[in-house]
Structures are given as structure tokens and as C-alpha cells.
Image (cartoon, grey):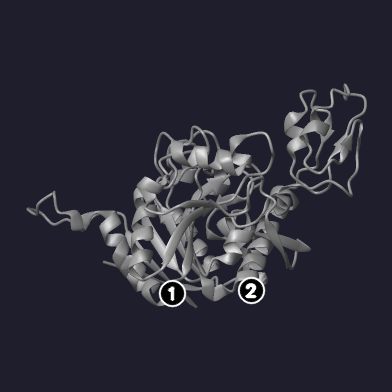
């Protein structure tokens, strides 16, 4: 059984006390949560510490606020560590989210800069997203390319904005490991079952896909699968939608995410990770989307643990135990306490698939003890 520490989002204000008391702030109280979770013992003096976050996309308005990231950076510095804030590129080649330069533009737009965070930003899988180190995987994947900067850091502090997800049901610490800490070719393997193909009947031989292909694998209407670097850029550049990829089903995606997360943990070493899940502004879909819908439950708080499976299990339990909010994607029945809220949002989703596969692979413990931090 693993311990999961909970810091309630509601300030412990008592009647008659001054509302200007800064110690009530969630950022101030975050230090107590980090201490209970063992941050001081986790970080050694001189450690390079990757603080892994998700920057969102252009238009995302409910990403994890930079003040929380800055607080964690300050706490790491107090232990003698040298933190940097990190993220990886997204699948594709055309959009800002898919390249390091664009990722940093998005970060700046959404409030993440050296000035706001107190630490430099490093894109962990390189300029175009191919900087990774191969690691063996179990279950649904053969191998995984772990983002190089994740492996080169001494320790990794995972800051996850816990949300719903339209394909994997939810996004938590496991997804932040299995998707957020891998290079682009593994993101392709997670989401897509085979190399792309061209529908010759639709192809106009405009050559846009060939010009965009970083592997030089395309001579329309043919794609050399052996040279394909698995980026999905060709699909984005084809205006005629002549390039075909076979996207995996939701359950398979969830199992692959768990397998990739296990590979990242094993490649880096489990003792090198500390997890924080932020159950604040819990949106129906992930921060990858270019807009943010209304949160589906009231703010719950912040969880911390050394166990990715336990913290995700606890996060999901707390959300399902909450009364859902009105004026959201939740229907009347799915707002009830105990309802499987994320599963009600999109078709063919099962929150248990990812957790069950993670437990089967030995990623962590599904049994946890919730410890409230004052």
C-alpha cells in the first residue's frame, strides 16, 4: 500500500481571522505538502531536477497556473537542487505544439517563462521531438524512446493537471509519464497502429508531404515504411486528406500509455520520481486542446506521492466522490456523487483500463492510504 498525501484546496480560514493572511494561500501550503511527501530527502544538493509540466496549447485557459510551478521550483532550490522546467513536443510537425520553438512560444503565451517560473525551460526531446533513448517496454509496446533530458536529469518532479481525456478517459501522472516523457516516435506508436499510406486516387502529387517529411520517406504516391520516422507530419500537410493512418482504439491507447509509463520509470529508476497531481479546474478534456471547457467538479486540492498508480487511483476516487457541477458537459445523473464522471463524457471510455493495465505491469500499487495535510 502506498501513501498519497492530500492538501485541501480550501483555505483553513476561521471566522474573524484576517483575509490578508498569506499562509492560507494554496501556494504557501504547498510547501507543507512537499515536505510530507519527502521532497527534502528526495533531492540531493547539486541535483539537476526536471520539473515536468504541460504547457497547453494556444487558446488553452485552464492549464496549471505558473504560480504553482514557481513554488515547486523554489522548494527544489531550497533543497540544493538545480531545477529546470520541461515538456516534450507533440505529435506532428506543422503546428507550434510539435516543435521545441513553438512549445516555448505556447509556454510564454500561457504564463510560463524564466521570469515567472524562476527556472529555465528545456524541451526534453529536442528541437523536432526525436531526441530520445530507446528503452524496453512490456505489454502493448515493444520499446519506448524516453525523452533525453528526462534521462539526463538526476531527479524528476512530475506536476500534473488532472483532467478528463477524450481517448484515454483521463490524464494523470501515468499519462504524464507515458506520453509526456517520451519522444515523438513513441507518441506515434501510442496513438497509431501502422506507418502511413497514401490513397493514390486522392493524391494530386503536390509533393507537400514529401517536402515536410524529415525522414525523406515519401515519393508520392508511395511511402517507404522503413524510412518513416513516425511523426505524423505528412498527414498534417496533405490538404487533400490522401494520407491514411489507422488510429488505435481508446482501450488500446490506455494500455499503451501504461506500458510506456512503466518503461520510463524503469529506464530512469523509480526512486528518481516524485508526483504531484493538481485536482484544480478539472476540465472534461486535456490541456492539449486549443480551448478549455468548464470544470466538472469543484476544486479538490493537490495530491503528492512517490507512486504514479496510487496517486492516479486516489485522484480518480476523489473526483468520482465529488458532486458534479452544473453548466458543464456532465448530465444530471453523471453529476451525482459516486458517478464515473469521465466515462459519461465521451463514448467508449473506461477509466479502469489504464489503471488495471498499470497494476498488471507492476507500475505501482492500486491500494493507497490517503493522508490529509493541514
Residue highlighted by disc 2 = 362
The answer to whether residue 330 is above or below residue 369 is above
Q: Is residue 312 left or right of residue 21?
A: right
Residue situated in front as seen by the camera: 331 or 147:
147
The answer to whether residue 269 is above or below residue 338 is below
Q: Quadrant of the C terminus?
A: bottom left
Point out the residue furthest to the left here. 16
Residue 240: give x, y in percent of width and height.
80, 23
Residue 181: give x, y in percent of width and height.
60, 57
Residue situated in front as seen by the camera: 54 or 353:
54
The answer to whether residue 124 is above or below residue 370 is above
Residue 313: give x, y in percent of width and height.
51, 63
Is any atom of residue 288 visible in this view? Answer: no
> For the residue labelled by badge 1, is the local secondary structure a helix, a strand or a loop?
helix
- Count residues near mark 1 (Cα–Cα under 10 Å), then give few for <14, some for 14-19, many for 20+: many
Residue highlighted by disc 1 = 42
Q: Quadrant of residue 345?
A: top right
Give how far apart the Cα atoms at labels 2 and 1 are: 22 Å
Residue 238: give x, y in percent of width and height.
78, 28
Q: Which mark is residue 104?
A: none
Amino acid at each position: 500500500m502506498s501513501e498519497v498525501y492530500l492538501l485541501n484546496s480550501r483555505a483553513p480560514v476561521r471566522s474573524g481571522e484576517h483575509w490578508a493572511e498569506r499562509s492560507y494561500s494554496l501556494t504557501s501550503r504547498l510547501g507543507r505538502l512537499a515536505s510530507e511527501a519527502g521532497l527534502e530527502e528526495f533531492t540531493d544538493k547539486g541535483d539537476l531536477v526536471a520539473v515536468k509540466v504541460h504547457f497547453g496549447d494556444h487558446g488553452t485557459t485552464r492549464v496549471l497556473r505558473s504560480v504553482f510551478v514557481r513554488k515547486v521550483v523554489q522548494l527544489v532550490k531550497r533543497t540544493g537542487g538545480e531545477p529546470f522546467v520541461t515538456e516534450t513536443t507533440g505529435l506532428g510537425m506543422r503546428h507550434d505544439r510539435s516543435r521545441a520553438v513553438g512549445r516555448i512560444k505556447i509556454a510564454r503565451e500561457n504564463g510560463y517563462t524564466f521570469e515567472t517560473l524562476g527556472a529555465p525551460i528545456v524541451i526534453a526531446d529536442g528541437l523536432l521531438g526525436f531526441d530520445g533513448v530507446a528503452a524496453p517496454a512490456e505489454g502493448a509496446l515493444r520499446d519506448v524512446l524516453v525523452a533525453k533530458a528526462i534521462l539526463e536529469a538526476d531527479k524528476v518532479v512530475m506536476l500534473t493537471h488532472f483532467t478528463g481525456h477524450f481517448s484515454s478517459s483521463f490524464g494523470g501522472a501515468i499519462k504524464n509519464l507515458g506520453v509526456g516523457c517520451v519522444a515523438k516516435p513513441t507518441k506515434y506508436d501510442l496513438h497509431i497502429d501502422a506507418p502511413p499510406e497514401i490513397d493514390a486516387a486522392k493524391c494530386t502529387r503536390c509533393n507537400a508531404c514529401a517536402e515536410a517529411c524529415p525522414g525523406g520517406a515519401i515519393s508520392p504516391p508511395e511511402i517507404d515504411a522503413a524510412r518513416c520516422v513516425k511523426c505524423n507530419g505528412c498527414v498534417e500537410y496533405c490538404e487533400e486528406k490522401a494520407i491514411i493512418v489507422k488510429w488505435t482504439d481508446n482501450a488500446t491507447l490506455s494500455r499503451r500509455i501504461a506500458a510506456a509509463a512503466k518503461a520510463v520509470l524503469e529506464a530512469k529508476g523509480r526512486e528518481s520520481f516524485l508526483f504531484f497531481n493538481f485536482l484544480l479546474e478539472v476540465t472534461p478534456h486535456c490541456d492539449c486542446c486549443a480551448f478549455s471547457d468548464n470544470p466538472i467538479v469543484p476544486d479538490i486540492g493537490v495530491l503528492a506521492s512517490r507512486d504514479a498508480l496510487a496517486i492516479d487511483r486516489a485522484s480518480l476516487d476523489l473526483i468520482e466522490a465529488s458532486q458534479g457541477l452544473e453548466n458543464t458537459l456532465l448530465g444530471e445523473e453523471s453529476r451525482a456523487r459516486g458517478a464515473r464522471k469521465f466515462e459519461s463524457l465521451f463514448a467508449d471510455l473506461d477509466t479502469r483500463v489504464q489503471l488495471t493495465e498499470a497494476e498488471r505491469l507492476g507500475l505501482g500499487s492500486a491500494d493507497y492510504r490517503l493522508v490529509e495535510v493541514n
